[in-house]
Amino acid sequence: MKLLALDTSSVACSVALQIDDEVTERHEEQPREHTRLLLPMIDAVLRRGGVHVADLDAIVLGNGPGSFIGMRIAASVAQGLAFASGLDIVPVSSLAAVAAQVFDEHEAAEVVVTQDAHMQEVYLGIFRSDEAGIPSAVIPERLQRASPVSELEAKTAGPRLAAGFGWQRYPALLAANRAQFDAVVDVSHPRAKFLLPLGASGLAGGAAVPPADISPAYLRQKVAAKPAPSP
């Protein structure tokens, strides 16, 4: 399996290459530097792996939700590479990538991920790990204000962990839900190497699409839209 994974949906610019069981990664957290960093990072991992884009089975795209500009940067680059090389793209949730890292590094039955959506909101995803160790969404990803998350009232069979930068960005959101967590872990932004197993699973399951069909998971379709009032 040869996969290239990209994610620029957060302050992190992250690239990973998988060739069979070997993974090479470049990951930097530098706000507003994605356009400068992304292509050199891709070139670096391809050179390290000794492959060209055309040698890949697919490109795995961290498809958000996240920064509007960031998502567009990765999507545009992935589309350009895929068009030029005749490849398909496997879109993967950037929130699920955060959950995948937590499941890999911690014992957890459920991981609740938030990322900053601005306008006093976060992008929310809740995940459990399937039999293959792949994060599976418990609810559709959505926008959430700084209020209790109703789905967290149900108990889990094991530890429930919180991850993602949204909890740091909005302390009131964490305070409103802290009693439902066993721990808050220090995994803030998606890393491309954790997109790889999600991408491989998606490729095997027929989730790859032609580059023209990629549509970033904005969740909020209008950037200027005002958030709904709190209940």
Image: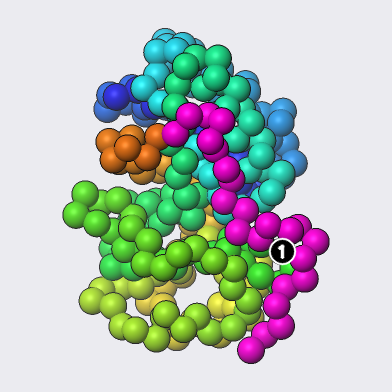
What sort of colour scheme is used for the picture?
rainbow
**Residue at left 71%, top 83%?**
229
Q: Is residue 211 above or below residue 130?
A: above
Location of the C terminus by quadrant is bottom right
Q: Residue furthest left?
A: 131
In-image side of 151 versus 115 (left or right): left
Answer yes or no: is residue 210 visible.
yes
Corner quadrant of residue 161: bottom left
Q: Which residues are magenta?
A: 209-231
Inspect the magenta stretch and tell me whether residue 230 lies in it: yes
- As for residue 97 lying within the magenta part, the answer is no
Compare residues 36 and 54 and report the one nearer the observer: 54
Q: Residue placed farthest to the right in the image? A: 224
The answer to whether one can see residue 29 in this image is: no
Residue 115: image x %, image y %? Answer: 58, 61
Percent position (x, y) of residue 92? 45, 44
* Residue at the (70%, 77%) spot, across then down: 228
Q: Give the amino acid at mark 1.
A: His
Q: Which residue is mark 1?
A: 118
The answer to whether 216 is drawn above or below residue 44 in the figure is below
Q: Nearer the viewer, residue 218 or 127?
A: 218
Q: Magenta part mainly helix, strand or loop? A: loop
